[in-house]
Amino acid sequence: MKGLAVLPDVRITSKVLGLLLLFSFQGCESEQSKAEKAYQQKYAKAKALFEERCQTAGVVIHRTVRDVEGIELTKVRPKLEWADKRYFDPMFEGAAMAGENQGDDFIKQFLMSEFLVPDRPNERSSLGPPTQEKKRSGLVIKKGYAFVEYIDASARQRFMCRPDWSLDHPNWVPGQHHCTAIERSSTRYALDYEDIVTPADRALWVAGTRLKVIDKQSGETIATFTKFVWDPGFGVSTTGRWPWQHADGRGDRNCPYEQFKPTSNDSRYFVDTVLIPKQGD
């Protein structure tokens, strides 16, 4: 029709459409491939670093002490709230012990009894109040310490904590220990810890800690426990996991690691092999 422009006849054939889709798919595949390659490279680097650090992990005991009634805790692992943001922080100081007892439970673990299976005496087992003894017949009962001292840094006050099993409760509940302020320490030995926070390691989500048993009279370190953990997910949480807590306790992400040994009691399991609690009355 006169006066109307004639548009070119543009037809996208199935062949052309197929090529366009192919190029688009190849572009996406290329980006996915790059991301996967970058992750694998980072994973390999982190795994190698973790394995290198693990060469220095483990327990070193220079001497042991028997019939110890009480110990001092130079620091108490702070209580983390539910889904605390520190679980997701690569620089979180306590990352290597994120699965351990915290706050009052950190103190209480040293007062609890351990219930050992007779035919597996060297395998660490669960902790609980002595009131469980009558319900756990046939097990070997290993008592904890009679008291624990610690210093509240914020209050600048020393406290002594003793167990109170009058509740006759089988589980860990509030009210099972009481702490009172004291002026002087009555303990000779202390448990200390130093978290290992190396920026280059933390960039690859590798964390460590070192526990020490110290003779307060001589200043001598009589035993050490060094531990490392790593998170292969590099802090990504798409399934609701808490990265550092998720890493602690996994066999391929902890060193040293013992199957069936609860990592929540790592500090207790270390110190009572060095400072052996007094048994009996």
Image (spheres, rainbow, N blue to C red):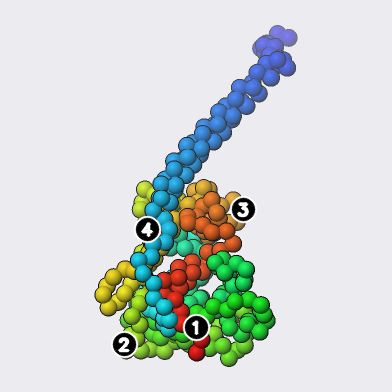
Q: Amino acid at mark 4?
A: Ile
Comes first in the chain, label 2 or label 4 = 2
Q: Which residue is mark 1?
A: 279
* Residue positioned most to the left: 218
Q: Amino acid at mark 2?
A: Arg
Comes first in the chain, label 3 or label 2 = 2
Q: Secondary structure at mark 4?
A: strand
Viewer-side residue, 171 vs 116? 116
> Residue shown at 31%/87% (left/top)?
184
Q: CA distance from mark 2 to mark 4?
A: 30 Å
Residue 4 image offset from top left, x and y in percent: 68, 12
The reply to whether the C-beta atoms of the residues labelled 3 and 1 are less than 8 Å apart is no
Viewer-side residue, 163 vs 256? 256
Task: Tell me the quarter of the image containing the N terminus.
Answer: top right
Comes first in the chain, label 1 or label 4 = 4
Front of the two marks 3 and 2? 2
Front of the two marks 1 and 4? 1
Q: Residues within 10 Å of mark 3 (few under 14, many from 20)?
A: few
Comes first in the chain, label 3 or label 4 = 4
Q: CA distance from mark 3 to mark 2?
A: 49 Å
Residue 115 image offset from top left, x and y in percent: 59, 75
Q: Which residue is mark 4?
A: 196
Q: Which residue is mark 3?
A: 239
Q: CA distance from mark 1 to mark 4?
A: 34 Å
Q: Which residue is mark 2?
A: 184
Q: CA distance from mark 2 to mark 1?
A: 25 Å
> Residue shown at 56%/88% (left/top)?
165
Front of the two marks 3 and 1? 1
> Residue shown at 46%/79% (left/top)?
277
Front of the two marks 2 and 1? 1
Q: Residues within 10 Å of mark 4 (few under 14, many from 20)?
A: many
